[in-house]
Image (spheres, rainbow, N blue to C red):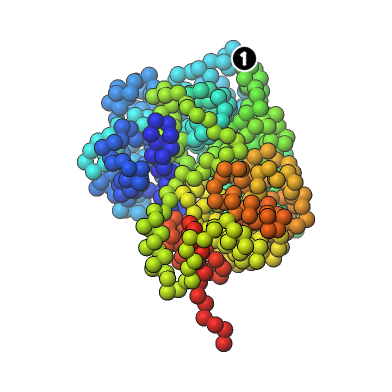
Amino acid sequence: MAVVADGKILLHLERERDSRERHAHWMSADLIHDALAYCGLTAADVDLFALSATQSTGYGTDTPERLRFDYAWQTAEQLGTEAFHRPHFERATAAAVQEPHADEPALSRLRNSECPEMPDAWLTGRGMLAIDDVDGRLLERLFSSPVLASSHALPMTVTLDGRVFPAVGVLHQAAHAAAAFFQSPFGTAPVLAFDNGMPIRSKSGFYGGGMLFYGDGSTIRPVWSAPLAAGVIYSQSSRKLNLGAFSGPGKLMGLSAYGTPRFHDPAFVGDIAALAGRYLHPEPGNSVIYGWLKAVEDRANALGYRFDGEPFGPFGKDLAASAQKSFEDLVLYALDRLRVLLEKTGRMGPELCLSGGCALNCPTNSRIVEDTPFSSVFVPPSCDDGGLSIGAALYLHHHILGHERTGSADLGRNIAALGRAASPAAVARALEGCAGDFRIDRDVDLAERAAEDLAADRVVALFQGRSESGPRALGHRSLLADPRRAGNWERVNHLKSRELWRPFAPACLAERMHQHFEGGPQHSPHMLFNYRVRSRDLGAVTHVDGSARVQTVAPGSGAFRDILEAFERRTGTPVVLNTSLNGPGEPIVETPEQAIDLVRRTGIDVLYIEGNRLQIRRPPEG
């Protein structure tokens, strides 16, 4: 959830950081009150709620006796009915059911309605190829159509502890797109929002596939659907290799570098709508990528592969590489179609925003910068579903309420520090509670001592400042190591109980980046682009294909920047290995106590909590 005041994001929290359950998505009344209290606010200060939901779960709560969501046309009358589409509202209310969740009866949810209006041009069966068939003057209407935009929001109410608030539900891809565009430095820009949602429109009008939007000032409008199978191919390939439903795609991205895309077939590059004969099984109930999966299986059988379910075996490596290649080519196809649309309407430029879970795919993001006309690409740090709350709030504030954007981000600036910081009192309590187990040096020079530890080949846990928004640790809740020692790759994977083949990312002083890495964009503050490693001295952060997922750290970035500068002064290397501070299957740590507990359970050498250095007291050998 996010707290936004006058267009400024005061706080962004992900439920999993509190519940300690990865990808937890149910809202609770207490989390709302806690977030408001952190910002010095109460429920009485709330003017409006903005809502968005994952495509499969709807608006859910695990405190149904205190928190409820409803569709309500009176909110449209209060905010202005022109911002909403009455037929879509009526479809949503007709399908809406307040129901217990099938797997967890204690939870309650309201079904969401992902049924945006689609003009006939999108539904010809030619998908994005139909852009070629439409006159530029007709395409121009898409950029100002009130009906298309209004069908991406629904008037609602939220009942919190007996008090009813007006609310707006923002459709999934619109929230993704708003999170990207309204946090970007661009005045105008197209947005590709896409994830692993269902790219086939159902008979009822449900559509979970990708969408192309265009942002202009304080407005953002859908301009074409992007029915790509890229996200589904990636997620189902990771499931086929037993890599996990949620964490699997991230693992698959790392695994793909070990293989060869022998199962990639260019015949599947295009809209799933236009290639339905290749993708879809004639009988319902089969995967929407049935044809792609069958082609992989047939090719693998012909080449003599064994389907042993082992990710790091020959089939696993080559399936990962093939899924990555298909993913990249599908995304570049969609962006070429977007280029045609923008050129026909006189809007083509180098700017592009990406959002949705698929925007976490770093090799693809860099291919976009290097291989397409879109050379200035912005991806928000919480581009996955964790950032939907930010997008919904900014969509409501700017697009529906009409407030102008103020201030501007910078492509080189890290905007992820939107979570909570530990108060001095909370830090003091945590230190007092662990004093018997740890040797504590208080109020040290954080940058110099941490750099000293890293140079001495100690693995350093860093807990400082506000936690990061999004799935990447960017120097606030991080685990750091010396990148020059190749053995630290395996060592840190052991500490985190991860598969030993999974790579780690380097964090680098921004102005030194191109001395050690090449390719990709000039800036990568959120660790969302791949680069080619130039230096031979960074073995712990150089993947097997010579790539690295770089985080650039700009001047003025606070304590983490200071550590990198101090490490460079000691070693001549402006780079450290940076990974998230969490154990296996756990969310990133949120509190000092959680960081201390992680160090107790692992072999992490040193923990810094703000300006305090902690080292566990280990019994003497023998």
Q: Residue furthest left?
A: 162
Q: Is residue 253 above or below residue 490?
A: above
Image quadrant holding the N terminus, namely top left
Rendered residue at 58%/60% (across/down): 450
- Name the one closer to the observer, 387 or 279: 387
Picture quadrant where residue 79 is located: top left
Rendered residue at 51%/34% (across/down): 183
- Residue 501 shows up from this direction: no
The amino acid pointed to by label 1 is Gly
Q: In the figure, is residue 397 to the left or right of 269?
A: left
- Name the one closer to the observer, 529 or 107: 529
Picture quadrant where residue 422 is located: bottom left
- Residue 339 shows up from this direction: yes
Q: Position of residue 265 (x, y in %)?
A: 72, 42
Q: Is residue 510 above or below residue 590?
A: above
Rendered residue at 68%/54% (across/down): 568
- Name the one closer to the observer, 235 or 32: 32
Rendered residue at 69%/66% (across/down): 487
Classed neighbour count for the residue bearing mark 1: other residues with Cα under 10 Å, few (<14), some (14–19), many (≥20): some
Q: Residue furthest top?
A: 137
- Kindly state the secondary structure of the residue where label 1 is placed: helix
Picture quadrant where residue 49 is located: top left
Task: Please give the residue where the numbered disc 1 appears in the rendered image.
Answer: 136
Q: Position of residue 438 (x, y in %)?
A: 47, 71
Q: Position of residue 320 (x, y in %)?
A: 67, 52
Image quadrant holding the C terminus, namely bottom right
- Name the one closer to the observer, 1 or 256: 1
Q: In the figure, is residue 191 to the left or right of 482?
A: left
Q: How many marks?
A: 1
Q: In the figure, is residue 538 to the left or right of 309?
A: right
Q: Position of residue 341 (x, y in %)?
A: 63, 22
